[in-house]
Amino acid sequence: MKSKLFRIPKTGTESFVVQVDRVEKFYDSRHYHPELQITLILEGTGTRFIGDSVDRFRAGDIFLIGPNLPHVFRNESRHNGDSANYSAASVSIYFKREVFGNEFYTLPETRRLTDLINRSYRGISVSPDIRGILAVEIESIVSLNGFEKVLKLLQILHLLSEAMDNSDSISSMSFTSPEKDSDNHRINDVFEHVMKYYNQDIKLDMVAGIASMSPTAFCRYFKSRTGNTFSEFLMKIRVGQACRLLIDEDMSIAQVCYESGFNNLSNFNRHFKLIAGCTPTEYIRIHNRAAV
């Protein structure tokens, strides 16, 4: 599963691309491209990898991903009886920084927009306070053409820049994008293995072998590329899966503990609270209250 520079398809009649995806699975290989990307998640939940950040995503989330920032959204299956149906939908806008011309960013009136573009290199998770308004604008651009489409993009960027101070940067300041496709290839293979076997006993020697490295070299490499030790990364994936099981499946907390790869309840509760910020019982209560 080799990953490489992802090329956004264009035509001669458009300067940027608006793409609507309604699929079983989002594109699930870690990738990057020179375009900035604004993505609104319409349907689906899962795990998102952006730069060196690993976290959950859900419907309503909006992200601004900067040029050449590696990322992937891996949505989860929904079980319906004996069958598993995937449901994933999003609207994404892909545009290059120079779409408005380089002189555009030297204007005093575009200073906030320039700051937004510069912050996008780390990725931005849009503040919940503005997601509702921004989602309407992002969905509306789908049906527009010509100059109206350009104006709508500017309006969306203006809203993003106004909400920038209350939005969270995603990747750490120390993260650097992979310089070679082979880096993404290695990371993708490790991600694929962990996402498939997260609830089993995953040995460091095994994943180091997948990356064709010694365990010591792999630990250094993985930390430099993801910002997490491998054990930290594995725990985040397991807790993320536990969050899904607690809400989507009719399981007890003890069942979720073992189904998500933990070997005892005390270890599960400790790591869950450390990563999710609350206990499994509190997580269920918070989610149920928000769903009312």
Image (cartoon, rainbow, N blue to C red):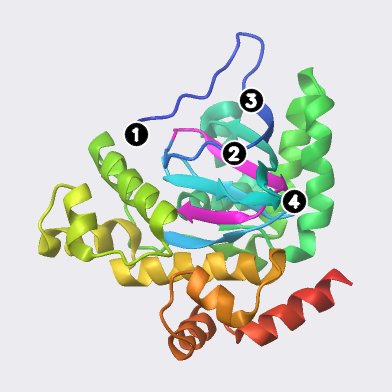
Label at residue 25: 2
Determine the CA span between mark 1 and mark 2.
16 Å
Magenta: main secondary structure equals strand
The reply to whether discs 3 and 1 touch (Cβ–Cβ < 8 Å) is: no
Amino acid found under the numbered disc labelled 3? Val
Q: In the rendered image, which quarter contains the N terminus?
A: top left
Label 3 sits on residue: 17
Query: Closer to the N terminus: mark 3 or mark 4?
Result: 3
The reply to whether discs 3 and 4 touch (Cβ–Cβ < 8 Å) is: no
Amino acid found under the numbered disc labelled 1? Met
Inspect this view and state whether residue 1 appears. yes
Determine the CA span between mark 2 and mark 3.
20 Å
Q: Residue 186's x, y, as percent?
A: 26, 44
SS under mark 3: strand
Judged left or right of residue 205, residue 103 is right
Who's the residue at 69% across and 40% down the image? Answer: 90
The answer to whether residue 124 is above or below residue 288 is: above
Query: Closer to the N terminus: mark 1 or mark 2?
Result: 1
Determine the CA span between mark 3 and mark 4.
19 Å
Determine the CA span between mark 3 and mark 1.
26 Å
- Which of label 3 and label 1 is nearer to you? 1
